[in-house]
Amino acid sequence: MGVNYGLEKVRFASPVRVGSKIRLNATVVSVEDVTGNGVQSTFDFTVEVDGSSKLACVARPIYRHYA
């Protein structure tokens, strides 16, 4: 089972116009064991808009996975 545990450091830096192409880049920040036979994964996400020099969004999501 996977659970979206939350978000840290969410920032919306610029708007995304309707019809724009976007790209999500993800980097693994950490992976840790948690109680209850689970694993917590933290990532750095950046959302880029095609043709724009500014990022649309920067966030740090946290997910938990249980066996």
Image (spheres, helix red, strand yellow):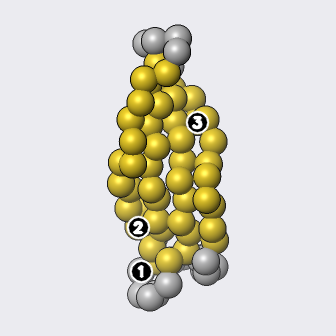
Give the residue type that dot 3 points to: Asn
Residue pointed to by mark 3: 4
Q: Nearer the viewer, residue 6 or 34?
A: 34
Marks 3/1: CA–CA distance? 27 Å
Give the residue type that dot 1 points to: Asp
Give the image location of residue 29, x and y in percent: 39, 48
Residue at (36, 48) in percent of width and height: 28
Q: Are marks 1 and 2 in contact (CB under 8 Å)?
A: yes
Give the residue type that dot 2 points to: Arg
Depth check, mark 3 against mark 1: the one in front is 3
User: Looking at the rendering, in which quadrant would you find the C terminus?
Assistant: top left
Q: Secondary structure beneath disc 3?
A: strand
Q: Earlier in the sequence, mark 1 or mark 2?
A: 2
Residue pointed to by mark 2: 23
Q: Which mark is residue 25?
A: none
Marks 3/2: CA–CA distance? 21 Å
Residue at (55, 74) in percent of width and height: 56
Depth check, mark 3 against mark 2: the one in front is 3
Q: Secondary structure beneath disc 1?
A: loop
Residue pointed to by mark 1: 50
Give the image location of residue 36, x and y in percent: 52, 11
Number of callouts in the render?
3
Dot 1, crowdedness within 10 Å: few (<14), some or many (≥20)?
few
Give the image location of residue 31, x and y in percent: 38, 35
